[in-house]
Image: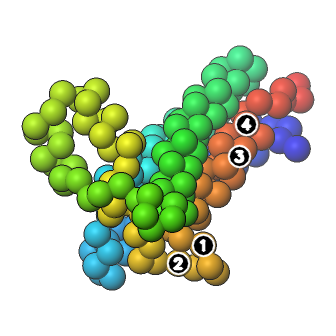
Amino acid sequence: MIDSRSQRRRVNLGGVAAVIGLLGYAYFAQFVQNYEPCPLCIFQRVEMFGLGVVLLIAGLHSPKGAGARVYAALGVVVAGLGIATAGRHVYLQNLPKDQVPQCGPGLDYIFDAFPVTDAVRMIFTGSGECADINWAFLGLSMPTWVLLWFVLLGALAVVANWARLAH
């Protein structure tokens, strides 16, 4: 139970540390281990960064009452977007081979050639490259781990910021 502003601050900043570690590993996997991220991976990184920003501001501000609940709600919204994106990615990875969408153009080309709304729709429709599983830990793919982390960090945002503090 969070019962002081300092505890609230530590929990939020602990969430920020987790986000930094997760994004750090994603960039390590990309630039050192040469795993090229697909379009849905890029969106998940942006959403994870957004969740980290919410937790950082909540940790630095560490308000009481309604202000803290705003951070809890923002954390849930951003984590929810991440859960939706990672969930779609996991879904694509678990499709039978004959139902996997064909590979599409790269993310840069999509945003250069199409309006933003069409580009986002195309990305979330999925691409064959998003269905590839080229990394796993304990039998779970990277998008599955990201999905779990969005659930955990979204719950952390609520636990850290929703409860009323003792006076």
For the C terminus, which image quadrant?
Answer: top right
Q: Earlier in the sequence, mark 2 or mark 3?
A: 2
The residue wearing badge 3 is: 156
The residue wearing badge 1 is: 140
Dot in front, 4 or 1: 1
Q: CA distance from mark 2 to mark 3?
A: 25 Å
The residue wearing badge 4 is: 158
The residue wearing badge 2 is: 136
Dot in front, 3 or 1: 1
- Reply above or below: 116 against 45: above
Q: Identify the residue at image location x=82%, y=31%.
A: 163
As helix, strand or loop, the secondary structure at mark 4 comes to helix
Q: Identify the residue at image location x=37%, y=75%.
A: 29
Q: CA distance from mark 4 to mark 3?
A: 5 Å
Give the amino acid type for the residue marked by disc 1 in the picture: Leu
Query: Pointer 4 and pointer 3: residues touching (CB < 8 Å)?
Result: yes
